[in-house]
Image (spheres, helix red, strand yellow):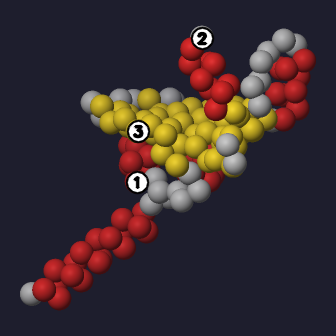
Amino acid sequence: MKKILLSLAATLLFSFAATAQTVDQVFAKYAKESRVERVKIGKLGMILAGLFGGETMGVNAVEVLDLKHCTPSLKEELSRAVRTLNDPDYEMLVTANNSGEHVRILVKMKNDSICEMVVLAAGNDEATLVRISGKIRMSDIEQLIKN
């Protein structure tokens, strides 16, 4: 009986690990889906924003995937992906699950700065993925929160 329970537990753990995805896999998968609106501002766009008076605070690139016009089944699939996301390169900054909405904010740190921040939000007929890359200092984030 003990062996059966252990093998069942191992099987469940393996199935959860097999369905867990990384941030790059989630972005790559949903960027290719039809009716996904994708906006990507690269390093050149951020330089131009800085030249015209915008404060970029170390941000080099921004990528946004909006699944607002996708099928409900695709949005539900993304919601499951957000709940099971497991990427060892990122630290969980904030997670919230409320009334069918699932939000995760992940950060990838390098030294004392954030080199990438990812916001994954899905549920209640909305689904959005945001990736912000650069060298963002924690002091800049604190200043942004204060203002």
Residue at x-position 44% and y-position 46%: 82
Query: Taking the image as drawn, is residue 25 in sight?
Result: no
Label 3 is placed on what type of residue?
Answer: Thr
C-alpha span from label 3 to label 1: 12 Å
What residue is drawn where x is 61% and y is 39%?
117
N-terminal label among 3 and 1: 1
- In the rendered structure, the answer to whether residue 92 lies left or right of residue 66 reads left
| Residue 95, position as x, y percentages in the image | 40, 39
Contact, mark 2 vs mark 3 (Cβ under 8 Å): no
- Kindly report the distance in space between the C-alpha atoms of the residues bearing marks 2 and 1: 34 Å
* Disc assigned to residue 95: 3
- Residue at 62%, 53% (x, y): give it: 24
Q: State the SS at label 3.
A: strand
- Using the image as rendered, state which of residue 3 and residue 144 is in the foreground: 144
**Measured from the top left, where is residue 50 in percent x and y?**
85, 20
Q: Which mark is residue 147?
A: 2
Q: Give the labeled residue for mark 1.
A: 84
Marks 2, 3: nearer the viewer:
2
Tag 1: amino acid: Thr
Towards the viewer: 73 or 141? 141
Other-residue count near label 1 (Cα within 10 Å), few / some / many at <14 / 14–19 / ≥20: some
Identified by mark 2, the residue type is: Asn
Quarter of the C terminus within the rendering: top right
Q: Quadrant of residue 94?
A: top left
Q: Position of residue 14 (x, y in %)?
A: 36, 73
Quarter of the figure with the N terminus? bottom left
**Residue 125 visible in image:** yes
